[in-house]
Amino acid sequence: MGATGEEIGYRDAIRQVHRSLERRLKALQEALDGADDKRAEELRVRMSEVEHMVRVVESLRR
């Protein structure tokens, strides 16, 4: 049996959120390169938060 329009929309939305979070992680990683110690710590905290959100979104896929 095929997926309903609602299921397809849900999967697409999850995929878009996941891509957005991955782009944010990449931007934070790029900002981390060459950042001073204080800024680097702030960026690592943000990256940790985004990584947590990625795990949450991945759990919604299952």
Image (spheres, rainbow, N blue to C red):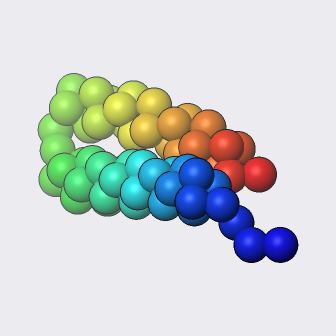
Q: Is residue 45 above or below residue 4?
A: above
Q: Nearer the viewer, residue 17 or 51?
A: 17
Q: Position of residue 40 (x, y in %)?
A: 26, 37
Q: In the image, what residue occupies the spot 28% across and 28% down?
A: 42
Q: Position of residue 18 (x, y in %)?
A: 47, 54
Q: In the image, what residue occupies the spot 51% across and 56% down?
A: 9
How many labels, in total? 0
Q: Give the quarter of the figure containing the N terminus.
A: bottom right
In the image, is 4 to the left or to the right of 11?
Answer: right
Q: Nearer the viewer, residue 40 or 55?
A: 55
Q: In the image, what residue occupies the spot 39% across and 29% down?
A: 45
Q: In the image, what residue occupies the spot 70% across and 44% down?
A: 59
Residue furthest to the right: 1
**Residue 11 visible, this orientation:** no
Q: Position of residue 61 (x, y in %)?
A: 68, 52
Residue 11: quarter of image: bottom right
**Residue 38 visible, this orientation:** yes
Q: Position of residue 44 (x, y in %)?
A: 38, 36
In the image, is 43 to the left or to the right of 6?
Answer: left
Q: Nearer the viewer, residue 32 or 3?
A: 3
